[in-house]
Amino acid sequence: MFPALGHPNSSGCGPWWRCKMDPVLAGSMAYVAGVRVGLDKWLPVLVWVTGLAFLGVFIVFIRKKELPGEVWIGVCMGCMFCAGAWRSGMEETAAARMTSALSKRDTFTGRIVPGTVKKSRQGSMTFLMEEKRGRIRVFVRKAGSFQPEYGVVQATGPLQPIDGFYNPGVQMPEVGAAIRGEGGRLQVNGRDCRILSQNLTWTDRIYKLGKALRQQLRHSMAPEDSALLEGMMLGGSQQISSETLRMFQRCGLSHLLSVSGSHVALLMGILAGGARLFHIPRKAAIPLIMVLLLGYGVLCGLRASVCRAVLLGMGVLLGRAGRRRARGTAFLGLAAILLLTWKPWWCRDPGFQLSFTAALGLMTLRRSVAEKLGVFLPCPLAQGLAVPISAQLLSLPFLVEHFHSLSPVSLWANLLLVPLLSLCLTGSAVGAVLGCMGLIVPARPILAGVSQLLGTALWMGNSLARLPGTQLVTGQVSWWLWPLYILLVLSVLEIGWFQPFRSRLRTGTIAAASLGLVTVLALPRFQSQPFTVYFLDVGQGDCAVAVTPEREIIVVDTGGLPGQYDTGERILVPFLRWLGADKVDLLILSHGHLDHAGGAAGLSHWFPISALALPAPDLTGTDGFPTKTVAKLISLEQFRQSRKIVYKMQTNQKICKKKSIIQIVEAPTEYKEGGENENSGIVRLVSGPYSVLFTGDAAGEEELRAAARAVRSDVLKVSHHGSRSSSCPEFLAGVSPRLGVISAGRGNRFGHPHREVLERLDGLGIPVARTDTGGAIKVVFDGRGPVWYSYRWQQDFF
């Protein structure tokens, strides 16, 4: 990929297994660790400054002494650690800088971040504003004549804090905002905004060039093909169809939609070939290519992986300019130091972590992996497989930490599809550039050929994605598993201490590490599992996941939001992966309304659903057809292949699951014209001596009918997000819960939960847990009764 960034042996330091770690790489690893510790602000900055000063004085005193190299490296790593902690300890997030302006009506002025303007057919728009204290996400209702694309704008309104969903398995909203540099959000009308200037900066001009390239692809290709190639060429996946995105995820090819080293290497090859074609002198070609690389980085949004790739590419060019062969690990370490000095919060960015570890694996492990594979595979195949394997060996811990799943087919997908998709990427780039230059005649055939080749690649990818076992769910993994994993990798590849002549040490380490890994992974399956119910934060909707002592997974409602945000794929699926689930034993939909069933189809795309229970009216509706959200679910091929039973809820019906019982307390028999809320079922989940009552959006009339039956439960999911139309005193007295859970969206326009409902619950002495204030709620039945925790404030208990 990078000719000058080779194996550690490339500098002629003897056999590769005797090479010590590159000092720059070692220093960068210490710096990264320091940055990570400093961000948590466990200690004041003065401690790190003092530590750095002490180590500096220590170096002065020992500089003339003959000490082993390891001592010097250790001291220098200590200095780098303190320097990193000092730098990140001084970092203040944009949200912290804007705290004083929160909830106050004020006027904010800033430049529109190129490429962030999104407009809807309803006349609203959103964009990012680069204000002096950080970025602000602006939502404009009824934009009217306010239609900027670039320039400096002004918006007046109350600044709101960063918002998001607080659930296990996904990144905390505050962390994501700190990584992106966002400090708040504005919701304003078009009349509260005005354009101050539309002068273009150099970044705006670069983005306009990218827009022209995109237009060339859109004019010559089908919308789905052009959207995919735009994402591959310039990064981003907003316009790519959800089916294609799922295929890339299942095949482990998502890295192709995030500009990284392979894209930059490809661009460097094209530019270098062009320079030779036009006989541009070497001294002029190298600076020109560096400028173009920088422009490409800006065009792709200057994300962490882009910046890493651009810096390494520039390192290669500088090495060629000086006719010197530099160590790739040194440039990689230097890039990490530079980027984290610029943006310390990037050390918590999954893209940064995966990009650097994959690059490090390619530089340090590829030859070793190829040698091992070459023992039993043909050399070309061994060399080809060594690339994805070496990249994934070091990035695997971060893949598991962030996504809790792996793609077993990713090795073959990368081997078969990456060459084809790279040809598509090269052809689309050449065709788009020719089109921008006005050379339409050669551009159109090139892009047409690319479209045909892309179709072949997508067909192959879909075939791989349909294979069984394309998703291996790992769940949460204890942090101390990873030292065992690293020891196993090093011993198998005979690296470091595990040199070939140390066969006993190597064999013993492989056996011990393997046994330790198996024990750590298998032990949780033999530990007792208390009955636990999670009420997920899905905004203005309902979603709960129950885990029985027999480890059955029962999902009650799936949430749902208007627009493109799929709560099933974006919230419920990551949570189930975090939980370690590989299937859903029973999906219960209280009714077919969007905020309860909108995520069901997204869930079915990724997890087999053994059984489905829902009210009969949602299968028939008023005209004999299922309601919209239910129809979307049952029409999916994945659902038809995986589900075995569909229960039509009936009052007093019982569904038995091993040692748990689902009681249908109340179920509608016919579709009521008042709306989906009036068609909501009431379900009681019983596991041993404990019970939870799920009421969906049941109104007071349904609750009163249910109260005539045995509905006493330990936990009540308060109906209709805490609306005053539900939770009547008679019903609450009949249930007599020890805990009430309200699922509602923060700052929702309905005012849920209503004050009257909160007063009723308080008057009966029922404690309340709310997802709008606490994020996901975990309720554990461990012998002490229902004990609940808030993910937003008590993450350590999840």
Image: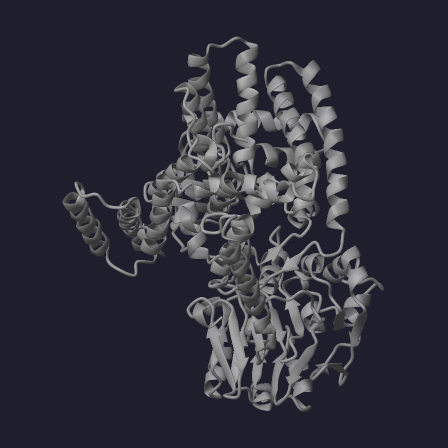
Q: Is residue 358 above or below residue 484?
A: above
Residue 257 image position (x, y, % from top left): 59, 40
Is any atom of residue 740 visible in this view? yes
Q: What is the quadrant of the N terminus in the image?
A: top right
Residue situated in front as seen by the camera: 240 or 717:
240
Vertical arrangement, residue 662 with respect to residue 367, above or below: below
Of 678 and 152, nearer the camera is 152
On screen, residue 382 versus residue 7, left or right, reads: right
In this image, 87 relative to 717: left or right? left
Which of the 4 quarters of the picture holds residue 224?
top right
List x then y, in percent, for residue 600. 69, 62
**Residue farthest to the top, as pictured:** 279
Quarter of the rendering containing residue 515 = bottom right
**How many marks are shown on the rendered structure?**
0
Q: What residue lies at 60% left-to-right and 90% top-to-bottom?
A: 734
**What residue sits 43% from the left and 27% below the top?**
314
Q: Residue at (18%, 43%) from the top-left corner?
A: 65
Report whether 357 appears left or right of 424: left
Q: Residue 92 location in percent, x, y?
A: 31, 50
Please say whether residue 198 is visible from this viewpoint: no
Displayed quadrant of residue 76: top left
> Relative to residue 50, is residue 146 drawn left or right?
right
The chosen color scheme is: one colour
Image location of residue 794, percent across then percent down? 43, 70
Nearer to me, 656 or 766? 656
Up/down of 360 relative to 229, above or below: below
